[in-house]
Image (spheres, rainbow, N blue to C red):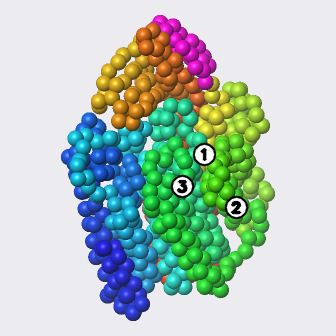
Amino acid sequence: MSALLAALVTGIGLATNRRDLISMSGKWSIWTLLSASGAVAVMEYSLLTNDFSMAYVADNSTLALPLLYKIAAMWASLEGSLILWVFVLCLYISAVAWWFSKRLDDRLLGFAMLTLFIVAAFFFFLLAGPASPFDTLSNPPLDGRGPNPLLQNHPLMAIHPIMLYLGYVGFTVPFAFAIGALATGRLGEGWLIETRVWTVAAWGFLSLGIVLGAWWSYEVLGWGGYWAWDPVENVSFVPWLTATAFIHSVVVQERRGMLRVWNLSLIVSTFALTILGTFVTRSGVLDSVHEFSESEIGPLLLGLFAATVLVSVALIFWRIDILRSAGAIESPLSREGSFLGNNLLFGAFAFVVLLGTLFPLLVEALNDDQISVGSPYFDRLTAPIGLVLLFLMAISPMLPWRSTDPELLSERAFWPAVAGVATLIIAVAAGADSVAEMFAYLFSGMVLGSAGRQLITAVRRRGIAGLTGRSSGGMVAHIGLAVLALGFVASQAHSHEVEARLTPGESTEVAGHQIELLGRVDRVENGNPVTEVSVRVNNNEVHHPALTNYINYGMKVGTPSVDTGWRDDVYLVVLDVSDSGDSALIRVIVRPLITWIWTGGMLMALGTALALTPAGRRSKPEPIAQPISSAPPDDDRTPETVGAST
């Protein structure tokens, strides 16, 4: 109700040009946050006190569930996850109101707040009606069923959904400002500058959430992988692709006054894709290893998606005359040319993934046939796009704006080329044997060299402060993505998998690692029988993969154990233990450089934090009123010019 009233009052203020009503959005933001906080408090209290009279608690918690997973149970199923969505959105609304507290009577901000309140009101409506998590039971059970077994055996379950939601929901803020800019006709670069910090923060959270989700999958699911092109993975990845394109293309608009329609389309697409992703994951419309619930809110979410697209497209067409770009790309071999290529590739990548994800749904809707699109489709079509993107990541920081002098480019490219060739030589010596793999190592090494060169130059100029700001933070994120790419390619191309039935004292060798079965232990954990085996790796550390029989679900779930190293991981899964206990079937998977994936993700998060840290180079402009610029400012010192000859 608070969000609906906030939207109503703000809307009346905008319609009647009552600045006092518009500026009240700050107070209304507090009420919406209090409402969302109340919902969180009630749910968490019910979970922590084992109030099984609440249907959600009975379905998603048990008396024996550990404290961490009781807390995390709030987002273990549809209804609770919507509470988290609303709470995060209201946090963002309150943060925006506080950040712009002195300018809340501005009409652009008013339309942005109105948009935020409308989105919040929609999700509050879902909580109050079709997806209410507060339904009660007339005959409550003595104990609950508990969350899905896969959601109660690793602490990452308590972390990665929060990161995903902070990213997903965070894109509502730049979307709202885009709507405000379209509604007021103030379509210069001001709204981009206002939303820069929010966009980068949301991108960082989503990046971290995706990587942590892959890590969770690797640690929990027992198949030794981390990315299966599952629909739930894909619908978080597609907005990341469009948001990454947006983060790069807005630089062109800020500096050259170009790509304004494109940038509006990108941020609208990113927000719309988060709604579409919520529809896919929470409506039961697609089968998925992550799909743990079905709901009746699908048509409503699909309606919000359609309304978002239709209203945004209508506003863009309404303002098309004042959205025409002030500049043009003079040479494809320029910074803006590389950014345009980057955007086209990210768009193609997003289209390929989205098509493969939704195509089975479309086929089933049209002729009731159930089909699936597997990894070969995604791998075959996305691999070349990914390679070219890596190449552009390597050369783009070396390119000046407008046009490139060949002599200057060759000077800047020397050390990145050396880094790329060195990486390739090491990879070939280690066993790289396919052309695509070699190109991936070459380009990843070039990215490391290119970004490293930019950072060294920045530090030489400004000391340790040179590591802060959007430019240097972006370079650290580039390094993280290159490290992630190296880990991804190596772990995919050179993994080894063996299944062996061993008796205590017996050993086998996999990819140079000695695996010895020591014995078996039976125990009970949180009311569930557990069969645990002890396995020694390389005559060193002993690991304990296990099989847990979740009685409430009537299923056995394996808990892998991983011997982690910077060079490779030895991944252990117990598949079966004989009734007599004299043998166990063990799956052993050796994956090289897989820890580089998690390290790369952490570096991307660090890059985001550095990008959000003020570099202290410029006084803060008046962003909303800032006019369109057709060229870089005279005192520009961003990474677009770092590295020039001095």
Tag 1 secondary structure: loop
Q: Badge 1 local density, few (<14 within 10 Å), some, or many (20+)?
A: many
Camera-near label (3 vs 2) is: 3
Q: Is residue 240 above or below residue 500?
A: below
Q: Position of residue 459 (x, y in %)?
A: 53, 51
Magenta span contains residue 290: no
Residue 285 is marked as 3
Q: Position of residue 13 (x, y in %)?
A: 37, 88
Q: Which residues are magenta?
A: 497-515
Q: What residue type is disc 2 on?
A: Leu
Q: Is residue 328 above or below residue 412?
A: below
Q: Quadrant of residue 609?
A: bottom left
Q: Is residue 307 above or below residue 584?
A: below
Tag 3 secondary structure: loop
Tag 2 secondary structure: helix
Mark 3 vs 1, N-terminal side: 1
Mark 3 vs 2: CB contact within 8 A = no
Reading the image, the residue beneath label 1 is 229
Q: Position of residue 282 (x, y in %)?
A: 47, 55
Q: What residue type is disc 3 on?
A: Val
Q: Residue furthest left?
A: 49
Q: What residue type is disc 1 on?
A: Trp
Mark 3–mark 2 Cα distance, whole angstroms, equals: 30 Å
